[in-house]
Amino acid sequence: MNPIGNHGQATEGLDPESSRFLTEMAEQERVKANRFRGVRTVLVVLSATGIVFDLESLRQKILLSYPDAAVFFLTTRGSSVGTSAPQELDLVIDFTGPKQRQGFFFAKRIRGIARFAVGRKTGFFRKRIYDRILDEKKETLPTEMLERERSIQRKVLALAGVAFMPMGDVPPDRGKITPLDLPPMQKL
């Protein structure tokens, strides 16, 4: 997709940093379009392979996208992490991947108590049970396990409408004036 428009001048004449930011902004707009309406409760089923984001940062990312929501966490075996979830949910975000142990009808049971469900394509019936599915076989993913899991979890969050904008990357200072070049502040 063209980050600026459909006019064919997406990144022509732009420096790499500007084109990267335009691409990220277009991606964030696509993620916002995936949001579900009226979400008050969110259940996150954690992956058994690895927890890439700590629970509080994951909660913060979900609350930034769904400000009125209460967020609950569940392991792949079905035990609660922290406060247990209510019996009726609005959104389920399932990070459970292939070859991770889970009850046979776990996805069907979770889907029965939720209005919307988003997850990874694992098992036989999940494609028919969940509203939105990430098929890992169709994606180009890193080979290292934690980087692969991070990429997959970000894509599942994007399918759920949870925006993910990393804030820790500070660009280099390209200013021409340094503090030593500034006039003295004694007469101000």
Image: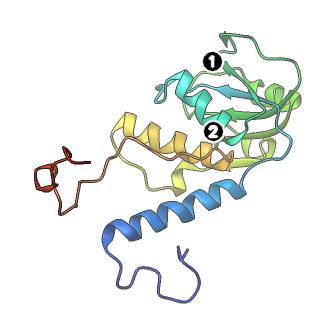
Instruction: Tell me if 152 is positioned left or right of 111 in this view.
Output: left
Percent x, y for residue 44? Answer: 67, 28
Give the mark, 2 or 1, whose residue is nearer the N terminus. Answer: 1
> What element does badge 2 sit on?
loop
Q: Residue visible at 59% across and 85% down?
A: 6
Q: Residue visible at 65% across and 10% down?
A: 82
Instruction: Tell me if 128 is positioned left or right of 156 in this view.
Output: right
Q: Which of the image's four quarters has the N terminus?
A: bottom right
Q: Residue furthest front?
A: 187
Instruction: Tell me if 20 is positioned left or right of 131 in this view.
Output: left
User: Which residue matches tag 1?
Assistant: 75
Please state which amino acid type lies under the numbered disc 2.
Thr
Percent x, y for residue 25? Answer: 53, 62
Percent x, y for residue 144? Answer: 33, 39
Query: Is 95 located above or below residue 141 in the figure?
Result: above
The residues bearing labels 2 and 1 have C-alpha atoms spaced at a distance of 16 Å
